[in-house]
Amino acid sequence: MSRLEVRDLTVGYEGGPVLHAVDVEVPHGELLAIVGPSGCGKTTLLRTIAGLLRAQSGEIRIGQRMVTTHGIHLAPEKRRIGWVPQDAALFPHLTVAENVAFGMLAGRGSARAARRAAKSDEVRRLLDLVDLAPLAHRAPGQLSGGQAQRVALARALAAGPELVLLDEPFGALDPMLRADLRAAVRELLRAEGVTGILVTHDQAEALSVADRVAVMRGGEVLQLGTPEEVYRTPATPWVAGFVGDAVFLPGVLHGDEVATAIGRLRAVPVADAAGLVPEDGADVTVLVRPEELRVVRADAASVADATAAHRADADRRADDGALDGIVTDVEYTGHDAMLALALADGVRLRARVTASGVVPRGTDVRVSVDGSVLAYRPEA
Ligand code: ADP
Ligand code: MG
């Protein structure tokens, strides 16, 4: 079993600490995605887990083995970790099969040993796994970016690692390839029963591919949870905005409601990192996801969502608490659309509607909020 546990990890360079008391856990066989702005310490965390950097304090445990703790630093080649870098970094003088074979030799290999091992059943199995068997004898220079990354993945898996670390491995690829490759990564890690960490700057990728998502900022993990938890109940407004589209409104909390520019909304107060919950009467920041806004044509002849149930629901809402507004812009994306709205009192919002709910620019609408919203203590 190769569960990863990182406890209270502090790591720095000459300039001072870059990671501050980081806790991360990845259960056996799960894929954790790490997202966060450039420079927040994602690569530093991966390099420390791999043993390429020494920790100032804290612990790292992989499966049953403590690999980093006070006074102990297990060498990288003894950690049974596979690494997939951003640029595949293949050996140009070795074929595809030989590059994969090199991974099997766990860093002690020579080109000659790799040539021999390239003929093994295990290399053939790995090449089949990443769908590259027909290209076994190609040179890396003759591969596309996506193919090269598949080779890097097979090479990382070749040594039978307990843990695979992927540092923005799809960064240089076009969107179609990215989608293909991330599905392949997830399938492969599952099939091999390997625990993985994927660093990505693409929040949609993180939410769609991972079992759990860690959101980092400034050397700290602000939240670690399932994609649903991170999206539906973000720990802070910043996390909310980082992992998805968000509308923020100032408000004042009154019991289980919050008074905002778009009316009184049912609200759930959220505790901050220090455990402080906004009190009754406090100023709060309200989070509304664009898809939680319901948009109905003002003439009510037709509504945003075409189903009868939605229509009845929307009509009822239009009578209690909906606001007048106008559609100022439409961003059509095929499966849905984002409507920019200006409300009568000057508030501007963005609402996501299904493709069938798109109304043209200039349409008078009524806007209400579906369900309850989250209320945060305003961020400093
Ligand atoms: P990310 O991968 O999230 O973009 P990094 O882990 O690469 O972030 O970097 C985190 C911080 O550490 C940044 O401020 C960066 O400038 C600094 N840093 C990274 N590598 C080094 C290094 N070798 N020496 C000194 N500072 C570094
Ligand atoms: Mg990085």
Image (spheres, helix red, strand yellow):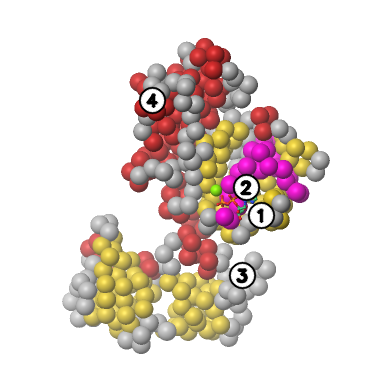
Q: Is residue 363 above or below residue 193?
A: below
Q: Secondary structure at mark 4?
A: loop
The residue under the point 58% across, 74% down is 379
Q: Nearer the viewer, mark 4 or mark 2?
A: 2
- Dots 4, 1 in contact, CB < 8 A: no
**Which one is earlier in the sequence, the residue at label 2 or at label 1?**
1
Residue at label 1?
18
Which residue is label 4 attached to? 132
Magenta residues span 39-64
* 306 left or right of 349 in image: left
Q: Is residue 147 visible in this depiction of the protein?
A: yes
The amino acid sitting under disc 3 is Ala
Instruction: Please identify the residue farthest to the right as the structure is shown.
Output: 71
Residue 156, percent from left and from top:
53, 30
Whether residue 316 is visible here, answered yes or no, is no
Badge number at residue 44: 2
Q: Nearer the viewer, residue 150 or 205?
A: 150
Please tell me whether residue 124 is drawn above or below residue 356 in the rendered image: above
> Between tags 3 and 4, which lies in front?
4
Label drawn at residue 271? 3
The answer to the question of whether label 2 and label 1 lie on touching residues, with beta carbons closer than 8 A, is yes
Tag 3 and tag 1, C-beta contact below 8 Å: no
Q: Residue 67 lies in magenta, yes or no?
A: no
| Residue 367, disc | none
Q: If you read the primary sequence from the N terminus, does the residue marked by circle 3 or circle 4 appear first? A: 4
Alpha carbon of mark 2 to alpha carbon of mark 1: how far? Answer: 8 Å
Instruction: Give the residue type at disc 2.
Output: Thr
Badge 1 crowding class, 10 Å Cα cut-off, few under 14, some 14 to 19, many 20 or more, is many
Q: Quadrant of residue 70?
A: top right
